[in-house]
Image: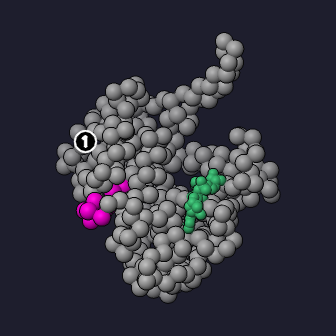
Amino acid sequence: MNKTIAVIRGDGIGPEIVGEALGVLDAVAARFHHSFIYREAPMGGCAIDEFGVPLPDSSLETCLHADSVLLGAVGGPKWDSQPSANRPERGLLKLREAMGLYTNVRPARMFADLASSCPLRADIAARGIDFVVVRELIGGVYFGSHSTAEENGEQKAVDIMSYTEHEIRRVAHVAFQMARKRRGRVTSVDKANVLDTSRLWRKTVEEVAKEYPDVELLHMYVDNAAMQIVRDPSQFDVLVTENLFGDILSDEASQITGSIGMIPSSSMGEGTRGMYEPIHGSAPDIAGQDKANPIGTILAAAMMLRYSFDMAQEADTVENAVDAVLKAGYRCGDIMGEGCRLVGCREMGRLIREQI
Ligand code: NAD
């Protein structure tokens, strides 16, 4: 197969980790006789430096015409003083919206070989952690209007949160379909005791659930969900929620699995094109030092193979290669454990390629 991939290397450790993921994709292409064509799409701080904006039109076009997008990370202290409309993250929000990527899927899975990195009590971790967070991505308060104005002699800030039924319905379908391929349980998270948007969320999810009688649906308030994720994460299979709650809970979910450097995510809309990235940021504190863990980005590339290109065997091969390297005791600094061998970003990439 021939596939065109838009490549956003981004800032900080972005170019290092994306470089290793592309090396892994090259190894997959060689083994399975595919051809992956990479088109560079500058975005983030590097694009501000070169083009004056975080997402130049040419990069947007490249992404819109590609079969999928692979992203490292954007942002860093150098661009913190940019006006909010021109910050690196704005490029990301604009790209998600332009590509119609309304769902973000993040697996929270603990690798058996990394159980010692799990911050939870051993008896809780022993029950296993294997669930996915399905987050609505282009609605809610992040995309509502924002304003700050003077009122009665003081500043007042307002952020509007809104949801329509169709915005809720389409992400609910993604969650139920995913549950069908997993353990058949959806936990929908909201704050229906307080928020109107949450009451509409709950009602709409219940309507969608009627089309999936084989899937169990539970509702949970977001404050309780935040507790349950650390009290007993083994109860979750697919957790679905709106944008703001999903942003927070998916970070919490990833943290309990060990390292932030290990976790991929996919953002999808209609059709097969998606955007794939690790969940972490640009880690400016370790950029350029060959210390970044590239596994999150490599597993993001595996998700791209599975979900956008329908290459399940190729995706399995990448995931098994990662498992094998971890089993052999190789670790980047963020997941280093006793008796293991410390390797840098480049060496970790090479070891994984070697397995493929
Ligand atoms: P971060 O995720 O970049 O870093 C948090 C900590 O985790 C740091 O100590 C870092 O060294 C470590 N870390 C992250 N990824 C790692 C990896 N692959 N291997 C080893 N260690 C890793 O979060 P932050 O410091 O809050 O943000 C830094 C910048 O990234 C900010 O400008 C932020 O806006 C941006 N950011 C971008 C994205 C994105 O592009 N999707 C997401 C989050 C943050």
Residue ID at (41%, 74%): 319
Q: Please tell me whether residue 246 belongs to the stretch shown in magenta.
A: no
Q: In the image shown, does 253 or 312 lie closer to the viewer? A: 253
Image vertical order of residue 252 relative to residue 217, above or below: below
The residue shown at (74%, 51%) is 79
Please report the bounds of the magenta region as a residue range.
122-132
Residue 21 percent across, percent down from the top left: 56, 73
Expressed as whole percent of the image width and height from the top left, the position of residue 272 reads 46, 57
Q: Is residue 22 visible?
A: no
Please name the amino acid that badge 1 sits on.
Leu
Q: Would residue 116 be found to the left or right of residue 212 on screen?
A: right
Identify the residue under disc 1: 218
Residue sitting at x 33%, y 36%: 221
User: Going 41% across and 68% down the picture, which residue do you hit?
Assistant: 117
Q: Quadrant of ligand 1?
A: bottom right
Q: How is the image coloured?
A: one colour
Residue 217 in the image: state x and y as whole percent: 24, 43
Q: Nearer the viewer, residue 129 or 204?
A: 129
Q: Residue 348, image x and y in percent? A: 53, 80
* Residue furthest out toward the top: 152
**Farthest left residue?**
214
Q: Is residue 259 above or below residue 252?
A: below
Residue closest to the eye, 123 or 151? 123
